[in-house]
Amino acid sequence: MKKLLSAILASVLMFGCLTLGFGCKKKTDIVDDPKTINVRLYKAGFGDLFIYELKQKFEKVFAKEGYKVNILKPSSSSAGTPMVQEMSRGYKKTKIDLYVTGAIWPNHVSKDGLYGEVCEDLEELVFNKTAIDYSGKESEKKISQLMNPDLVPFLLADDGTMYGFSWAQTSAGMVVNTSKLADYGITELPRTTNEMFECFEMIKNGANGLGPSSETKTYPVTYNLAEGAGGATTYQNSAFKQWIAQYDIDWYNEHLRMQTENADGTWTDMQNGWQIFQDERIVDVLEVGIKFMAEKYAAPNSTVHDLDQAQGLIMAENDGRGNNAVFMLNGDWFLNEIKANYKNQLHDIGFMNVPVISAFGVKLMGAGTRLNLSDDKCDEVLSYACKLVDEGKTVDEIIAGVTAEQGVTLNKEEAQAIATARGICFSRGIEHLAFITKGSTKAEIASLFLRMMASADYANTFLSKANGSTPYATSTVEPEYEFISQARALVSNPHFRAINGRVQGVRREVLTHDYMLPIAGASNIALVLRGKTGDPRTEATSLQEEAVATAKRYWDDYFSK
């Protein structure tokens, strides 16, 4: 089976290489000099201005040594399997020292990868060294002590080797046009899914003197589903996975692995891992997903919007028919992607974490629990507690605040559960990793470049040039836009926990694709269609049954061999 998968992957890699032209690339842009590192950059939502400023600062600091940085033409194609294929050609042929890329996991470049170890181990080369600022001064702490610990597992291959360097700390969430929202008399952003749907209903039906969406042409939400499973539909999937993790982050990690964690940190395969999809909490998440994706809330033609069209509906009325929208699942990179076209409207957008799923509050505090609250009261308490979490309050302060304002006294376990749920962010940043090519004769110079990327000075560069954050240091300059301040507040919150949907453990072997629930890619459109009529809970139960059956089929097939 492994040989078959390897052959298929090899074909895919080769196809990507031939299609994008990496396999036959001429080295006319390579600088073959012992003191110049050649860097290939993945040009994504962050653009490329940040790396050119870093190059300038780096070359100034190391002018005496004569170190230079040659940035090869940045491209949105410089990511994923074509880059692994290029690395596999070997350093002697590529002469590329550093890949600042995306969509490559450490296992792809490890000893157990399809092409064997094609990148350097960065633990001693980078992470056990100090950061270097723009004056050449080294930090007091090692980079391994500076970075967000939640990101460490995603830098490691299965054998524990640290191949990846995380170069961006980005969070998926919701973008909202605060100016449009205020027109409906809504001044507070929703913190629970019930509050989110209340906002949707007010926009859809009309409020504060405004008519319904059919008259105003303003709709609650816009999607971007046209790009398929490999495109921007991942924004929807990020939210759905976040709702799962809000219940219990350990339970979520078990989903990603189909394994249970032992006291010593090792993992044991589940007896029947497919059964993890049978939990009622899965139905809760699917029910919210079906409601969220319902056609009645969506701007017309959302099922065929590409990313630019969907983002444009948040900022303006650009679909030719006057349609526009208020909310969109997106990420903190949104501002950088739209600033060129909507520079006069950037102060009208806000960034918020995905609301906490209201069913979590009911299961924590509702009927049959210690507090035995009504469903409505559960949501009030959950929302207010989330407000305190957003303000960075401690668990004891959350308890005191909820008691004073809501007349409900949470215990520490309940308050901590809410704080953890609210602090969870789906991090797309871990998909942005840098790698030093195996056998690079300038690996030490490349490591100095990465060490400068871990500095507070570079954090300022990344904020000003890419409107983003880094995993190692907080920028010391104030952002120009509230949008960026709100995004930074999520990752700097003391309750912040980063999650990602990368399949690991036995699940990666059992399920041959990133299968969480049948809601990826084109199935997102299926959710829109299923949400047109009928009872969402019934439809969610049906989807869960499909998920269980699919997972069991994969499981039985794998273990029968």
Image (cartoon, rainbow, N blue to C red):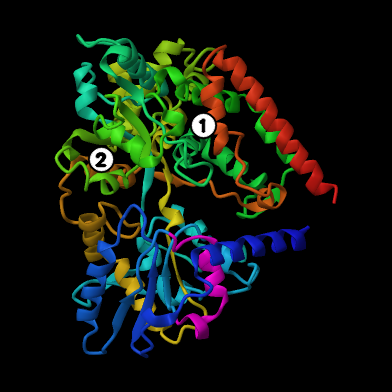
Q: Position of residue 165 (x, y in %)?
A: 43, 65
- Which residue is at the front of the view, 315 or 153? 315
The amino acid on which the numbered mark 1 sits, given as a three-letter code, is Tyr
Query: Is 424 left or right of 80, judged from the image as shown?
Result: left
Q: Quadrant of residue 376?
A: top left
**Quadrant of the snapshot with the N terminus:** bottom right
Q: Quadrant of residue 279?
A: top right
Check disc 2 and report the residue beneath it. 486
Which mark, residue 308? Answer: none
The amino acid on which the numbered mark 2 sits, given as a three-letter code, is Gln
Magenta extent? 77-95
Determine crowd level at label 2: few under 14, some 14-19, many 20+ residues with C-alpha closer than 10 A. some
Q: Residue at x 58, y 38 (%)?
A: 251
For the residues carrying marks 1 and 2, which lies nearer the camera in this image? 2
Asked if 272 appears above or below 433 in the picture, the reply is: above
Which mark, residue 247? Answer: 1
